[in-house]
Image (cartoon, rainbow, N blue to C red):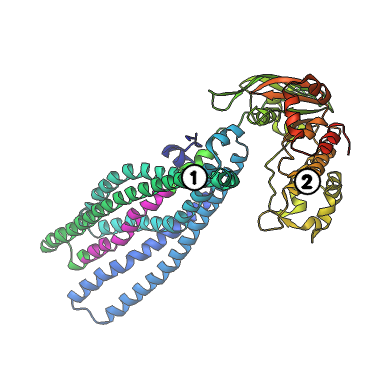
Amino acid sequence: MTRDLLPIAGPGRTGAWLWRELRAHRFDSAATLLVGLIAAAAAIVPAYVLGYLVDQVRAGAEPSVIVRVTIAVVAAAVLGGIATGFSTMLIARLCGRILADLRERVVSRALTLPTPVLERAGKGDLLSRVGADVATIGQAVTVTVPNMVASVLLGVLSLAAMAGIDWRLGLAGAVAVPAYGFALRWYLPRSAPGYAAHREAIAERGQLLVDSAQGLRTVHAYQLERRHLAEIDVASAKARDVSVSVFALFTRFVGRVNRAEFLGLASILVFGFVLVENGYVTVGETSAAAVLFHRLFNPIGVLLFGFDDIQAGGASLARLVGVVDLPPEPTPPAGPAPADASLELSGVDFSYDGTAQVLFGVGLRVEPGQRVALVGSTGAGKSTLALIAAGSLTPTAGSALVGGVPVASLPPDEMRRQVAIISQETHVFAGPLLEDLRLARPGASSEEAEEALRTVDALGWVSALADGLDTVVGEGGHELTPAQAQQLALARLVLRDPAIAILDEATAEAGSAGARALEESAAAATRGRTTLVVAHRLTQAASADRIVVLEHGRVVEDGSHAALVAAGGRYAELWTAWEGRVPRGYATARATGGA
């Protein structure tokens, strides 16, 4: 399936973002540059001293000159080692701070993205950005970037030193610069698309893995293992082939770099010989220039070959910046507050992809304090309508109103105060259970949390835990049952205390054994609130004030349980089928509101 992946920033936008970050950390950037220059200057000293030693030996100097040369070389080595260590630390710290800030901003922006955007992109694309892409950049900034900065500074100072010895020797060494430039010019335009394609291939493979893992039960139930494995194999092969093609380009790039090194060193030796023969420079000066250039082989190799990692890091950075630079969602202007706790949907049409329509002119009104159940077969549009009512989706036509005010015109904070939605896929966050509850209302006291748990009949099992409210739950902690996780979500709803509650099949995962208790918990959590329930279990719909039946995106029936059963329409068919699945006494008790 083709997905609309999240945007990727172009080179210009990525570079502009990086420049802004460096300016924001200008003091650290300046300190890093200064220490790097000291380290590069210390690395040049031994080559200068070697040239001096050659000329002194040719002139018949005293052996004591070796002592002076040794002291100078040792002092330069100690200073260079200290400066190099500090430079590496400063670069890693600077880049680490920028990367940490970027990662937080990516997650922050992702959490505010509209639901349709994330649905179209897929979780795999986002997870690969905050996971694999961050790791790739982290590897580059801790190893590659410090080495490349040191190589650039050493290269610039070495060319300046050669020109300082004799400008003609500097020009001879500079002959290699265009050759290096041509090698890069050949390599970069060919490899950059390859690295971008590689990151996209990894994201595609990640999405397939996420889909297979999340739908594992469905995959096993329909025996789709071979199909999913085949799709993952194809995605993995694509990522492998792209990686091999990029590496093939890199090996050809290495040959061009080696030819540039030969050209530069040969030029210095040939021109140096001519200059020595004509008395313009000494043998020591020519030796110093040759050693300076030869010592550049490793730094230049690090610099040029480091572009392999920089290209990968740049492709990952562009993917992260693409998320950060997404324009913020427009903030609606301040308007009137909702007049009451009513919920109204009027003439709602909706399509996820702009072609296949899901809802057709749906309209319904939920009065303040009323409980309305949405019923229909799978794919009827119930969950889509619930998400529109909660403000998570924007209808392509029609409107959703809260207290007479359009949902689209309510500020996000006001919308969250007015409306809360609980879905079938309830997540238990890792950490103490009390902190999980406080996500709904930060600062809530332990007594308030206990009262919320008592309301949904969950305080008993929470108190039985080893550490009670302080028990660590979620990944790596105490594992909650699906019913307990749903009760925890309902307790959050009680703590949040919104005027309107939307339950999107919030009792579907409980299993038959715990269904009745969980339905009672949901009823207690929503008592007194305007409630829209997407009813997976018809017993939950039967106890509602009204039932709205959806089929193929349209409202086909609207009324009480008794009236709809008596009408003998679609709801009556669904109820008859449901009665055949559950004990008749249980279904009848729930339909009549009995315990």
Q: Amino acid at mark 2?
A: Gly
Q: Dot 1: what SS?
A: helix
On whether residue 294 falls in the magenta region, the answer is: yes
- Residue 508, image x and y in percent? 72, 40
Q: Along the horizontal axis of the image, is 566 left or right of 134?
A: right
Please tell me in which quadrant of the rendered image residue 506 appears: top right
Relative to 523, 27 lies left or right: left
Q: Which residue is outermost to the bottom?
A: 63
Residue 299 on image: x %, y %: 33, 59
Residue at the location (79% across, 43% down)?
Answer: 518
**Left or right placement of residue 176 versus residue 365 in this view:** left
Measure the alpha-carbon separation of dots 1 and 2.
Answer: 33 Å
Q: Nearer the viewer, residue 413 or 425?
A: 425
Total tally of numbered discs in the picture: 2
Residue 52, image x and y in percent?
A: 25, 70
Q: Amino acid at mark 1?
A: His
The residue identified by callout 1 is: 228
Residue 83 to residue 97: above or below: below
Circle 2 sits on which residue?
514
